[in-house]
Amino acid sequence: MVDQDIADDFEGLVDLIAGMEDIKSVLDGLTGLAAAAMTGATGVPIECAVTLHRRKRTATIGGSSGRAVVIDRIEQGLGDGPCIEALESRVPVLLGDVSSDPRWPEYCSALSAAGIAGSLGIPMNMEDDAGAVLDFFAPVSGLFTEQTVAEGKRFADMAGKALRLAVRIASAEQRAENMRAAMDTRTAIDLACGIIMAENKCSKDRAFEVLRSASNTRNQKLNELAETLVNRFSAPEDAKAHFEE
């Protein structure tokens, strides 16, 4: 049964990465799977959110529900609690019972008011200076036993690998998009220079200087001005475009 649970969780994470739209959608899906795994382990509905830390900034990015995100942001607002401690220590941190645990009294009081009796922060292994924690919330105290914590760690290990892959894919796609944008900009500038060369019977260097001077005079970005010129020149009308210093 455990092996089947692992296989199901792995398959769910693979499907999540394969169908991802962006990192936010991955995190929302990931916390949904995590909540389902812990709900199965405890027999009680568990909610989950994910906290990310990068470049000295910590934020709640996604959750299994809107309520989970709101609950998790209580800790972010206070700046202290089990999930933040798990981020710093890189080991699971358990708050088994908000009514008796002496740590984080303000946080415990806020959780109790929200109907939460226990919480658990389990870090995911990330890269570089980044950190991530799965934040679980239980409506009943004493649910996060040694066995359920082990289940959470097992899922977090797989989820961390999936999240690292998702980040790599997203970063690669962003680099490719930036490269395409740079190439499009370069192409527009080259075409605009060609138009100016033909119209003014000048060299490419001179054409570029004319284009740059017009950009400065009009207080318009060079690539935007180039695109405007190219679009005007390629319009159906026999339009002429002359640039003067």
Image: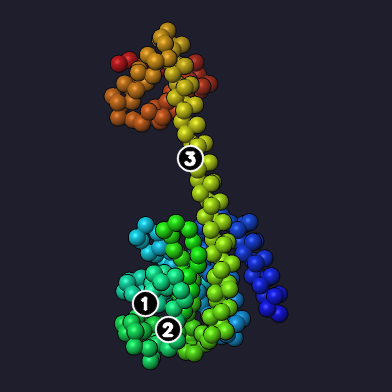
Label 1 neighbour load within 10 Å: few <14, some 14-19, many 20+: many
Residue 56 falls left or right of residue 187:
left
Cβ atoms at labels 1 and 3 below 8 Å apart:
no
Along the line of sight, the residue nearer the viewer: 90 or 77? 90
Q: Quadrant of the C terminus?
A: top left
Amino acid type, label 2: Leu
Q: Which mark is residue 95?
A: 2
Residue sitting at x 32%, y 72%: 79
Q: Which residue is mark 3?
A: 178
- Residue 48 in the image: x percent, y percent? 50, 74
Q: CA distance from mark 1 to mark 2?
A: 9 Å
- Residue 12 seen in the current view: yes
Q: CA distance from mark 2 to mark 3?
A: 44 Å
Q: Which residue is mark 1?
A: 81
Along the line of sight, the residue nearer the viewer: 146 or 238? 146
Q: Secondary structure at mark 3?
A: helix
Label 2 neighbour load within 10 Å: few <14, some 14-19, many 20+: many
- Residue 69 seen in the current view: no
Quadrant housing residue 29: bottom right
Amino acid type, label 3: Asn
- Name above or below for residue 165 compared with residue 226: below
Of discs 2 and 3, which sits in the foreground? 2
Residue sitting at x 49%, y 61%: 126
